[in-house]
Image: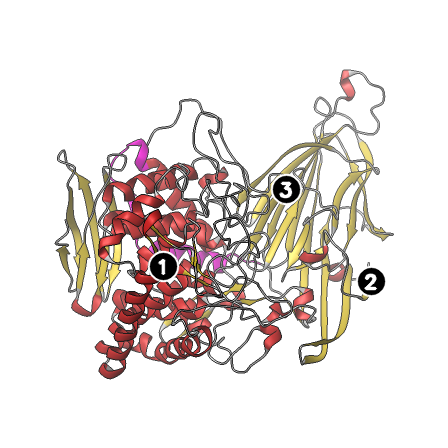
């Protein structure tokens, strides 16, 4: 991997704000660490803004900002200075840097917020001043911060100086009577946040939104205080972070498979930085309240993304688990067992719910809890039900654990039954259309309202079926039939395999566009091809629905300049009339789709193209702060005029799909194909020249654990050496190698 020497490029998603997070808590501030009721700034817990103003002042004025940086994902540190008020005049001696009283604020979130405030008088002058904290809470929903307030409630503010552990409380009650498409009732919400204090010198006072400490500092003296903000959600105080959960996370990832550099080449460093950051981000995204441990072991679920997607997103946890399958099976089991409990049970058009359909989103924000919108439990996607059985098959290939798999068969079959009965029309293909007045218009992989476009740039009306929908249902039926056959359900396995084969035959007949050497983006309500060139066919390659004779043509088409930006694959061709490099699904680049296509190219036995794309995505990670791939970035072409792409303004970072993407790319490059039922690991490694050596430790297949070293030889062939093996496992080279 090469970079221009001395490059200063470092991109920061959401560059006008700063965020730290842990669990359900996100603190988003201005770049100076203050919180004002602007945009999405605030202390957010359960997707509710519990603090909408938080700004430190000295005698009513802002101190001079010095520095602010995250220390870890859940903590940051800020410095401010001011000159003693006793110093007067404009001469150098009163410069805040030359005569500095320092304010150091160390913050940690999860769940809630702890601030440790330290004042140090670095001058030779005794000083007296008021340290003030402006405070407010509005209990706003994310959708309300830039728009009109929808919810109404009662906010009570209570100050009790006699009880430092509950010195100040903001307490909010709201109710809403709702009626949507026959779904009606009364919803209520009660949330609060309480401030506990420990401090030196005199107790503070609180009045009109200002907490005020009167401070006396001798020369070289220090003053300290700790502020602990404790949220209360639905009558329960949330426990603050004590570090134990994070130590368990660290221990878990330490026992998972991991990569180690076997050389000091620049490419290895780039890859290792991306993998290291990805591991840390996946641990940090963990939703602690969804932790579960049963007889089969622990599981946990990641949030979809920070700062705004802090909730349970069905397809996000499924795809993230698939991408990290080579790390461990815990993420797959967690995603599958959690979503198995979130199948639709009734027909509820407002929530787009039908029996057997898998939930799309489970949100905790005020407007969802109060049923202003259906997203407290919303089912408007096909991706979850379509992909769930495929992940069950992947878990089987890695573990061959019947005890894990058996409970997942029924929800997988129920999801497929829903798909066949409710999503398949007379064409024999799968389509979607929302029934909800507040539902998602598009319910496939690309779910933004303007994502699916005809070749002339016009919007495609529902019902419609995208090509990747057909691919994922195909992959799920093939994969689940494999599992069912192994478990003795041969008749059902045979039926699913036959249905998949018939779908594949008809798919290639209808979706193939001979003149474009590519697959159609989808079919419209009239069963006519949507003749737009987009990234969707990459998912078709991944799932095996494309005829062998067409695979290389599809791959070649997606690697042309109008689709391959040099940093990844665009969601829509740059030659398309509707192309916009900043658009969420009409031109931007998603790292998760880059990883998807890298694996697809590996499965199509196109190693040169695979490594070219993987290199681009790994190099893209070097452009971003912390080597962290964001949710999405703009689709500008990588050239002299565009040494880096623009940013999608509302991109989440970290984000589970992007954090897990590097692991899927490494699985593709090393050609890892688990076959735990046969105690085999099939490998087809193709290390590129920019990654000539790497080690993979503690890879678990079935009950065996293996350490492997991969080295690229002078003939460009990759050798694999077994460094350690515990348990019964055969390492088998693919016939394609």
Q: Position of residue 194 (x, y in %)?
A: 72, 61
Q: Secondary structure at mark 2?
A: strand
Q: Position of residue 45 (x, y in %)?
A: 64, 59
Name the colour scheme.
secondary structure
Q: Is residue 250 magenta?
A: yes
Disc 1 and disc 2: Cα gap in Å? Answer: 64 Å
Determine which residue is flagged by label 3. Answer: 17
Residue 132 shown left or right of residue 302 in the figure: right
Residue 369 shown left or right of residue 268 in the figure: right
Instruction: Tell which tag, 3 or 2, sits nearer the viewer.
Output: 3
Instruction: Using the rendered image of the protein, determine whether residue 603 is visible from the camera's viewpoint.
Output: no
Q: Which range is magenta?
A: 241-268
Disc 3 and disc 1: Cα gap in Å? Answer: 44 Å
* Dot placed on the residue nearer the N-terminal end, 3 or 2: 3
Q: Secondary structure at mark 3?
A: loop
Label 3 packing within 10 angstroms: few (<14), some (14-19), many (20+): some
Determine which residue is flagged by label 2. Answer: 158
The relative height of residue 77 versus residue 152 in the rendered view (above or below) is above
Quarter of the figure that contains the N terminus: top left
Q: Give me the disc on residue 511.
A: 1
Which residue is most to the right? 208
Q: Position of residue 100 (x, y in %)?
A: 72, 27
Q: State the residue at coordinates (64%, 48%).
A: 28
Q: State the residue at coordinates (70%, 80%).
A: 184
Instruction: Tell which tag, 3 or 1, sits nearer the viewer.
Output: 1
Q: Is residue 403 magenta?
A: no
Q: Quadrant of residue 144?
A: bottom right
Disc 3 and disc 2: Cα gap in Å? Answer: 30 Å
* Dot placed on the residue nearer the N-terminal end, 3 or 1: 3
Choose between 484 and 353: the one closer to the eye. Answer: 353
Which residue is most to the top? 91
């Amino acid at each position: 991997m090469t970079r221009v020497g001395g490059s200063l490029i470092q991109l920061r998603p959401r560059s006008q704000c700063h965020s730290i997070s842990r669990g359900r808590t996100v603190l988003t501030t201005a770049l100076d660490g203050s919180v004002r009721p602007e945009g999405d700034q605030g202390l957010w817990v359960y997707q509710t803004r519990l603090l909408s103003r938080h700004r430190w002042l000295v005698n009513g004025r802002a101190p001079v900002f010095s520095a602010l940086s995250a220390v870890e994902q859940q903590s940051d540190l800020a410095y401010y200075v001011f000159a003693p008020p006793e110093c007067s005049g404009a001469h150098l001696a009163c410069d805040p840097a030359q005569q500095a009283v320092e304010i150091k604020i160390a913050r940690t979130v999860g769940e809630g917020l702890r601030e440790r405030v330290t004042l140090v008088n670095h001058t030779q002058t005794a000083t007296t001043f008021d340290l003030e904290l402006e405070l407010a809470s509005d209990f706003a929903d994310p959708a309300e911060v830039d728009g009109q307030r929808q919810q109404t409630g009662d906010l009570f503010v209570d100050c009790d100086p006699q009880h430092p552990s509950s010195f100040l409380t903001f307490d909010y009650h709201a109710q809403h009577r709702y009626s949507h498409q026959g779904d009606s009732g009364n919803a209520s919400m009660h949330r609060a946040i309480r401030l506990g204090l420990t401090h030196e010198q005199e107790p503070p006072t609180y009045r009109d939104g200002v907490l005020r400490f009167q401070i006396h500092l001798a020369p070289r003296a220090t003053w300290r205080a700790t502020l602990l903000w404790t949220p209360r959600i639905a009558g329960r105080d949330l426990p603050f972070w004590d570090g134990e959960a994070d130590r368990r996370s660290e221990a878990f990832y330490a026992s998972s498979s991991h990569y180690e550099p076997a050389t000091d080449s620049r490419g290895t460093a780039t890859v290792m930085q991306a993998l290291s950051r990805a591991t840390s981000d996946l641990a940090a995204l963990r939703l602690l309240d969804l932790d579960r441990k049963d007889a089969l072991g622990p599981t946990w679920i990641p949030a979809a993304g920070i700062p705004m997607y802090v909730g349970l997103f069905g397809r996000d946890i499924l795809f993230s688990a698939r991408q990290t399958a080579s790390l461990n099976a815990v993420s797959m089991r967690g995603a599958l067992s959690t979503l198995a409990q979130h199948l639709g049970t009734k027909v509820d058009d407002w929530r787009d719910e039908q029996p057997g359909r898998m939930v799309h989103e489970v949100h905790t924000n005020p407007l969802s809890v109060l049923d202003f919108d259906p997203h407290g439990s919303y089912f408007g996607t096909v991706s979850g039900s379509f992909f769930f059985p495929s992940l069950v098959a992947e878990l089987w290939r890695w573990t061959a654990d019947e005890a894990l798999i058996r409970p997942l068969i029924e929800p997988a079959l129920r999801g497929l039954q829903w798909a066949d009965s409710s999503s398949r029309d007379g064409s024999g293909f799968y389509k979607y259309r929302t029934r909800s007045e507040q539902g998602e218009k598009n319910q496939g992989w690309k779910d933004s309202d303007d994502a699916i476009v005809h070749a002339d740039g016009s919007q495609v009306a529902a019902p419609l079926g995208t090509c990747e929908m057909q691919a994922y249902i195909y992959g799920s039926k093939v994969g689940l039939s494999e599992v069912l056959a192994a478990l003795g359900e041969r008749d059902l396995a045979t039926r699913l395999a036959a249905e998949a084969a018939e779908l594949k035959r008809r798919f290639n007949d209808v979706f193939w566009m001979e003149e474009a050497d590519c697959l159609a983006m989808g079919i419209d309500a009239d069963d006519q091809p949507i003749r737009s060139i987009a990234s969707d066919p990459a998912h078709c390659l991944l799932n095996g629905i494309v005829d062998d004779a067409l695979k290389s043509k599809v791959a070649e088409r997606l690697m042309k300049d109008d689709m391959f930006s040099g940093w990844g694959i665009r969601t829509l061709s740059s030659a398309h009339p509707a192309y916009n490099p900043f658009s969420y699904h009409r031109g931007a680049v998603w790292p998760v789709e880059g990883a998807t296509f890298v694996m697809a190219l590996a499965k199509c036995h196109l190693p040169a193209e695979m490594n070219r794309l993987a290199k681009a995505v790994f190099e893209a990670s070097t452009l971003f702060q912390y080597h962290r791939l964001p949710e999405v970035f703009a689709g500008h072409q990588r050239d002299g005029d565009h040494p880096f792409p623009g940013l999608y303004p509302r991109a989440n970072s970290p984000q589970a799909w992007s954090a897990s993407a590097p692991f899927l790319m490494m699985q593709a490059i090393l050609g890892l194909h688990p076959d735990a039922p046969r105690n085999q690991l099939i490998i087809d490694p193709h290390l590129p020249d920019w990654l000539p050596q790497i080690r993979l430790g503690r890879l678990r297949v079935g009950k065996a654990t293996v350490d492997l070293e991969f080295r690229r030889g002078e003939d460009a062939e990759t050798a694999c050496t077994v460094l350690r093996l515990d348990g019964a496992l055969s390492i088998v080279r693919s016939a394609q190698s």
